[in-house]
Amino acid sequence: MVPYADVLKRSFYRGMSGELSGFENYISVLQNEAFRLAAVNTLRFIALCIPLLMAFSLLLSVLIGGCKYGEDFFKTTSIIPMALPAASVAFLWKAAFHKNGLVNGLLIYMGGRPQDFMGTELAFYMLIICYIWRNAGYDTVLWSASLSKISPNLYDAAFVDGAGPVRQFFLITIPELKQDFFIIGILSMINSFKVFREAYLVAGAYPHTSMYLIQHLFNNWFASLDMDKLCAGAVMTAGIIFFLIVLLKKISGEAVK
Amino acid sequence: MKKIKKSLLLFICCMSALLLISCETDNDSPVNSGEKPAMGRYVERALKYPVEGIMGVTPVKKPDGSLDLYLYLDQSPGCFLYNTKDGIRYEKSGMAWFSELAEKQYSMDGIDYNADGSKYILAWAPEEGSKVYNKVYRVTGEDSLEEIKMEWQKNPAGELKVYIGKIKAASNGDLLFSNRGSGIEQYSPEGKFKNRYGGENDERFTVSGDSLFVINEDSSQIAVYDLNTYEKKTDVDYDNMTRDAVLTGGSDGSLYLTDRTGVYRLAEGGNLWEKIIEGELTSLSIPSMYFDGAIETEPGEFYILYADSESNNSIFKYEYDENISTVPGTELTVYTLKENSTLRQTAGEFQRKNPDIRVNITVGIDEDSSVTQNDAQKALNTEIVAGKGPDLILLDGMNADTYISKGVLADLSVIVKEVSEGGEKLLSSVTEAYKNESGIFAVPVKFTVPAMWIDEEYAVSVKSLKDLAEFAKSHKDRQIVSYISYRDLLKIFSLSCGPAWFDKDGNLDEKGMSEFLTLIKEIYDSGREFAVNEEEEHEAGGTGSTPAAQAVIDSMSDSSDVFSWAFGRSYTCCSNMKSYNSVNLPSLAIAERKGGIPVPLPGQAENVFIPVNIIGINAKTEKLDMAEEFVKLMLLTSVQNAKTYDGFPVNIKSLKHGAEGKGNESMYFGIQNNYGESSEELTGPMPSAEELKKVMELCLGVKTPYVPDYTILEMIIDETEEYFGGTESVEQAVSRIREKTRLRLSE
């Protein structure tokens, strides 16, 4: 708690001089164009990515669970992207999405026009793809663990009552997984912050505006010793994350009820 | 309740222990902890040669432990022998044999004594039609020369070629020579060939006891051979060995290795190095001084001879003093992102004046590490924020304005004033580059000058980028500046135009940027047909710590540009002049093409200079006096005169001293370039005093400081591809740049 308290304290003081500034830093941060852009991008990223990731990985875990053979193999291979070092992922990303990269090569081969993946709005969607590819395996394993807790008797009974796989999924699987929804959601959100490493390694400190995240800004503020703005920004970000967690818990809790 | 109390007590105990651990300071040095510090270290003492005006020295240890110094002077017969037992008193000895050598019109290339004191002379004695360039003599009891009939051997290529770099006499009486292209050769005292060692190009060797030590070609290991059996005994590793490393034999078969980091001893038969003299605490670490190996005269007594590029020779004695601490108790910490010669030079000079203070230079980005500039700067910022920052910061590669505006740096106005008023006038346009209404918080102690070499008749009409573009339109028979693509032009002219791109508030000046792009495109289009290899453009690669744009600017004044100018393929040649050495190549080109002068690089700003070696003092340092002395030293001639080739000095006396070209006399050099299928060559003497004076005048006239912002430059290059390709208008390009830079500027 001490470092957090120090950050909170510093957010009310002026830079390195240590003069009290009240809410000046907060006002300055809220008026900062870069902060507003980074905050919107980050929230948009979280809002899009987490539901997508959770839904996709749940689907994967159900499909893997339904496999008669090779369940362990698929689980293991799906988690490999998460085990890859960020630098390797960045290298793969560059090789694939560079102006002269593999994807553009394929597009040209198929008669299409090459796209500037990193220098246009497409960069944001590239970031989403990277995040989902990297984390889907991990979430799949989590969902698989939750699925294994559901009693097979429930499915047997439903089958006897004439319920097909889709009805079983919505009437048995989903309600039974609600308890784990919160924890997987939190873990996915935490992992979403880690996507900055790849984004930074691929596009540097100043990427295309669509993938400029709050971490880029904090990183740059730290490099330029803007500690006052950095602390005020960090306090506000922590507040928003706390609010999101509470919201997620509330949604999850109500769902369980 | 009891349980709660117990738990509470345990929790308080744990927290107290944690606090005690975390509050422990890192002042664990013996000085701070009150423990008795380790004592004893070698102390450096400057000695005086018995005569002045020495042009070179060859030292040889006599069997009685005294030191013979062969001093080369500009007076007949050219070389004089002095002997000293303590480095203070010298005794002049006769050397009739040297006159004999001079009569034959031979010169002495080397000399060594064997165990009984017999002298062996390696003479440079070329004879027409022969590739045997050397002869070997023994000095007889009558002080005359007796030639040894050497059984020279053919080299591995089957050719009889004798071109010897060094002679050493072994304890068994044998003679060893490094014969270029053949390796190390061993002969008996009568000249009978015995053996050949090492690779063909191994030249760095010494002998000690019955062993021969040879540094291998890639400086990775030292091979040890037995001189009696000719067998290799072992290979000894020495981490981070550089081309500076020099080997010398010690007593009892030991070996000494001297390099910038210190003097190391290897006991006979051992493979572990013992550091006996710390380089950082001696002149060894001063980059402008070149040294010979450490000569051990008596146990615990060493001499090291130094010379600089201006042929100033000096001799230092190193004696063990057991009454001073092994490591100085006080430490002055200096941070730099990258290795810096001026900083090393200052640290060495500072160390000489303050032997009880250790200057600890922390380099953020090691040459071999993968640490990025951003990572290194963040690590520094963490220390500064935690109040544990270095005492001094070299701000090169960092945003000095950030540190100034955040109050990290102390005011240096008093120091600058003191130096200026102390008789050493400083170039105020450079030293005041970071002056604001509160003072001077960072001082560039060197600067570089973006310049253009052009014919005098054209120089009058080309003062700005606009003039240059006009000139380009009317002279389309060749390129104005040698370039391959528009990127080269953007990078080169960013140096003289950068100051016009942003207004005082740091916002993009769209008019200035638009004008820049338009003019560069005009220059680009006018000479485009000559850029034949545009598709195969070779981008100077950036590294983890160096952006590609910076790599290109660092390599400006690349010899290929000079050749283009020298041989009439371009009207001008651009360079970012870093020292008077930057004049060497253009000077050869001027001689080749019979004309040309340096002018400030035409741009949108006038007389631009780039501040380098920007030093600042941490405002929170507890060693302010020491730090101020360090900064003062950086500005004085003792540091500014040193040829470290990283910028022009701000001290006007040093600037004038450099323009005298001392050390250039009778020096010639040459350089080759492959152009197409032919080869071009530029050879000649070093720049004349007149040429250097013109460059000095250019330096004295600088007025606009500009620190290149490579991130912005990379953005401009990226966003103008379509514009230079002709598919976008200049307004669209500027708009893209505005969008791209907006984010950075809005932070």
Image (cartoon, rainbow, N blue to C red):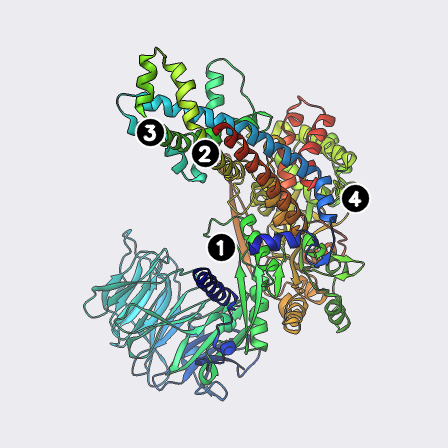
Residue B460, disc = 4
The amino acid type of the residue labelled 3 equals Ser
Q: Earlier in the sequence, mark 2 or mark 3?
A: 3
| Distance from Cα at disc 3 to Cα at disc 1 | 52 Å
Q: Mark 4 or 3, which is nearer the eye?
A: 3
> What secondary structure is found at the residue carrying circle 3?
helix
Residue toward you, B740 or B679? B740
Residue A148, disc = 3
> What secondary structure is found at the residue carrying circle 4?
loop
Give the percent coordinates (x, y) of residue B711.
Answer: 62, 41
The residue identified by callout 2 is: A184
Give the percent coordinates (x, y) of residue B479.
Answer: 65, 34
- Indicate the chain on which mark 2 is placed: A
Against B386, residue B281 (above or below) is below
The amino acid type of the residue labelled 2 equals Ile
Q: Mark 2 or 1, which is nearer the eye?
A: 2
| Distance from Cα at disc 4 to Cα at disc 3 | 85 Å
Residue toward you, B552 or A168? A168
The reply to whether residue B593 is in sight is no
Q: Mark 2 or 4, which is nearer the eye?
A: 2
| Distance from Cα at disc 2 to Cα at disc 1 | 42 Å
How crowded pointer 1 is (Cα within 10 Å; few <14, some 14-19, many 20+) is rated as some
- Indicate the chain on which mark 3 is placed: A
The residue identified by callout 1 is: B366
- Indicate the chain on which mark 1 is placed: B
The amino acid type of the residue labelled 1 equals Asp
